[in-house]
Amino acid sequence: MGRLEGKNCIVTGGAGGIGLETAILFAREGANVLLSDISGPALDRAVAKVKELVPDAKKIEGKITDVSKEADVEAMVAHLDPWGGVDVMFNNAGIMHADDADAIDTPEKIWDLTQAINVKGVWFGCKHAVLSFRKHGKKRASVINTASVVALVGAATPQLAYTASKGAVLAMTRELAMVHAREGFRFNALCPAPLNTPLLQDWLGDDQAKRHRREIHFPTGRFGEAIEQAHAVVFLASDESSFVNGTDFVVDGGMTKCYVTPEGPPTEAPKNLAR
């Protein structure tokens, strides 16, 4: 506990999944946390959940934000000015649209929407985080951008707009890491594998063939859990990772390194990771 003591953190896409789990861990580690999301009701529930699970948390607030609009992102970051400015920016908000397909069948409007949120939204977050770091004289600060393993490996079940957007996040993160290294601002990209979230489970439904086609690539035999990603984000946010910069931080259970998966029953996520 206390690994983020006194740090001011923003979590975009904070209403669920990786974002919510990260906000909970940030609060437990002593941080002041601003959760943002485009959905007001979902955001209110998330803020209440953090306060319920971490009753001794410091500042825990929510702010409705459309990350594809720079004015929204600027206002979100400015919300922390009275707190002393941003120390940690977790650019996690993103979409993978149901109509996203291959180069032939992806509608242009879906391509544009995906890039606006997944790429431009991350750019705006990085831009205004850096401006806040400078404004408040931060000598050490951390930005974590959510990418994906699909930016590193190909898939025959395409979501082309999503894949392209996550590749852009990797490239942008590396460049910003180099540009701002001498200022003490670190930039790293989190690359999650498919996770056991309600969104994925609802999408897979009872289609066992669709589920098996994805699970078979995991050496563990299981999807990851959102909290397993959140623990990685805490590390990247903390001073423990002070010499970690510009990385594609892959948290995938070995999926991208696997050629032939082992036999036997799937593993289970460690119980002590549960929030």
Image: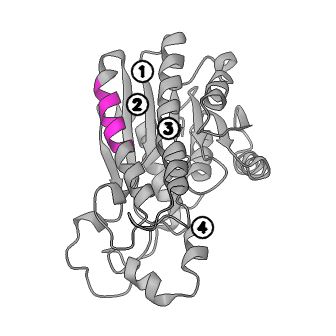
Q: Which of marks 4 and 2 is in front?
A: 4
Residues under labels 4 and 2: Cα distance? 32 Å
Q: Kindly identify which residue carries mark 4.
A: 199
Mark 4 / mark 3, whichever is N-terminal: 3
Mark 4 / mark 2, whichever is N-terminal: 4
Quarter of image, res 144 = top left
Mark 1 / mark 2, whichever is N-terminal: 1
- Per the rendering, the mark at residue 120 is 3
Circles 4 and 3: CB distance less than 8 Å? no
Quarter of image, res 242 = top left
Amino acid at dot 3: Lys
Q: Kindly identify which residue carries mark 1.
A: 140
Is disc 1 placed on a helix, strand or loop? loop
Q: Is residue 63 left or right of residue 273?
A: right
Q: Nearer the viewer, mark 4 or mark 1?
A: 4
How many numbered badges does the structure rendering display?
4
The boundaries of the magenta stretch are 169-178
Is disc 4 placed on a helix, strand or loop? helix
Residue 86 vs 97, above or below: the answer is above
Mark 3 / mark 1, whichever is N-terminal: 3
Percent from the top left, x then y, of residue 10? 59, 34
Percent from the top left, x then y, of residue 176? 35, 28
Q: Is residue 58 left or right of residue 222?
A: right
Residues under labels 1 and 2: Cα distance? 9 Å
Residues under labels 3 and 1: Cα distance? 24 Å
Is disc 3 placed on a helix, strand or loop? helix
Is disc 2 placed on a helix, strand or loop? helix
Q: What type of secondary structure mainly makes up the magenta span?
A: helix
